[in-house]
Amino acid sequence: MKPMAAVSPPAPWPRPSTPSGSYAAFREAFVKSAVGNFGSGWTWLVKKADGSVDIVTWALPAPPHHRDKALLTVDVWEHAYYIDYRNLRQKFVETFLDKLVNWDFVAKNYA
């Protein structure tokens, strides 16, 4: 994490398959995945063995497949956000993406 981080990742940077391939589409898909995570867990952006990237949701604190390389994760267990955001999980995830993600670190992990 990086306070007041860039709003979107540096280009060029491969994004998960989304209809438009845009950062806005990625952001929407990531938020939807994290908010829709039943109960608690983590939402991950991972690099697959073939070099593609994907958004996955998982209940455990590790990427779901050992061959996947973790690029980014958000913890959506209530302890991660409840004091500041109460039950506003979506607002927490949006703030995480918009203000805290260190995209330079994500890009280095991708390389």
Image (tube, helix red, strand yellow):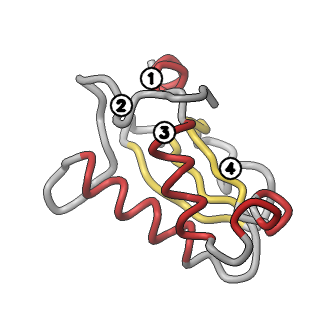
Q: Residue at point 49% right, 28% down? A: 5
Observer-side mark, 3 or 2, equals: 2
| Mark earlier in primary sequence (3, 2) | 2
Q: Which residue is mark 2?
A: 9
| Mark earlier in primary sequence (1, 3) | 3
**Left or right: 47 in relation to 44:** left
**Left or right: 99 in relation to 18:** right
Q: Residue at point 54% right, 21% down? A: 105
Q: Which residue is mark 4?
A: 63
Q: Residue furthest front?
A: 84
Asked where in the image residue 98 lies, by quadrant, the reply is top left
User: How far apart are the alpha carbons under marks 1 and 3?
Assistant: 11 Å
Q: Residue furthest right?
A: 79
As helix, strand or loop, the secondary structure at mark 4 comes to: loop
**Amino acid type of disc 1?**
Ala
Observer-side mark, 4 or 1, equals: 1
As helix, strand or loop, the secondary structure at mark 1 comes to: helix
Q: Residue furthest left?
A: 20
Residue 68, percent across and down?
58, 42
